[in-house]
Amino acid sequence: MNRSQFTTLTPEECDKLLDQLLSPQSPGHTPRVHHRNYTMTLLMLDAGCRVGELVQLRQDQLWFAHCAIGALTIERNQAKNKHERTIPITVRLGDAIKKMHEWWWSEDTALG
């Protein structure tokens, strides 16, 4: 498949997808799971992470010194092309990462 055959989402489609991921009407998941899925999708849409890179991310790549990172570094061993790259984090992705910390990573958060 050549590059001219790729179809991308429009900004409106991206917004609709993100809204659906956080919707209470989405079946079968808790708000924590909705938010985790939303954050993972933002990492792909806003930061350009590939799925293979996303699943290899570590918590310390997103949360450092008690705050969300300002730029994400995809390490050579995580990147498809084996080249390290640094990606700026959008405000909405930074906010989503902060909420991930509150709901998933904080020592005060009950697992469930």
Image (cartoon, rainbow, N blue to C red):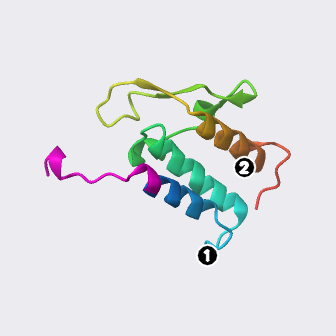
Residue pictured at 77% horizontal, 57% vertical: 111
> In the rendered structure, which amino acid carries the disc numbered 1?
Pro
Residue pictured at 53% horizontal, 46% vertical: 42
Residue 4, percent from left and from top: 16, 47
**Which class describes the residues within 10 Å of circle 1: few (<14), some (14-19), or many (20+)?**
few
| Disc 2 target residue | 104
Residue pictured at 78% horizontal, 42% vertical: 106
Horizontal side of 96 relative to 10 (left or right) equals right
- Residue 37, relative to residue 108: is it above or below? below
Q: Report the number of discs.
A: 2
Q: Residue furthest right?
A: 108
Horizontal side of 14 relative to 26 (left or right) equals left
Q: Is residue 11 magenta?
A: yes
- Residue 90, relative to residue 32: is it above or below? above
> In the rendered structure, which amino acid carries the disc numbered 2?
Trp
- Residue 33, relative to residue 47: is it above or below? below
Residue 44, percent from left and from top: 45, 45
Image quadrant assignment for residue 105 = top right
Q: Earlier in the sequence, mark 1 or mark 2?
A: 1
Between residues 5 and 73, which one lies in front from this camera angle? 5
**Which class describes the residues within 10 Å of circle 2: few (<14), some (14-19), or many (20+)?**
some
Callout 1: helix, strand or loop? Answer: loop
Between residues 13 and 55, which one lies in front from this camera angle? 13
Callout 2: helix, strand or loop? Answer: helix
Residue pictured at 56% horizontal, 33% vertical: 90
Residue 27, numbered label: 1
Residue 57, percent from left and from top: 52, 39
Residue 52, percent from left and from top: 39, 46
Horizontal side of 73 relative to 28 (left or right) equals left
Range drawn in magenta: 1-12
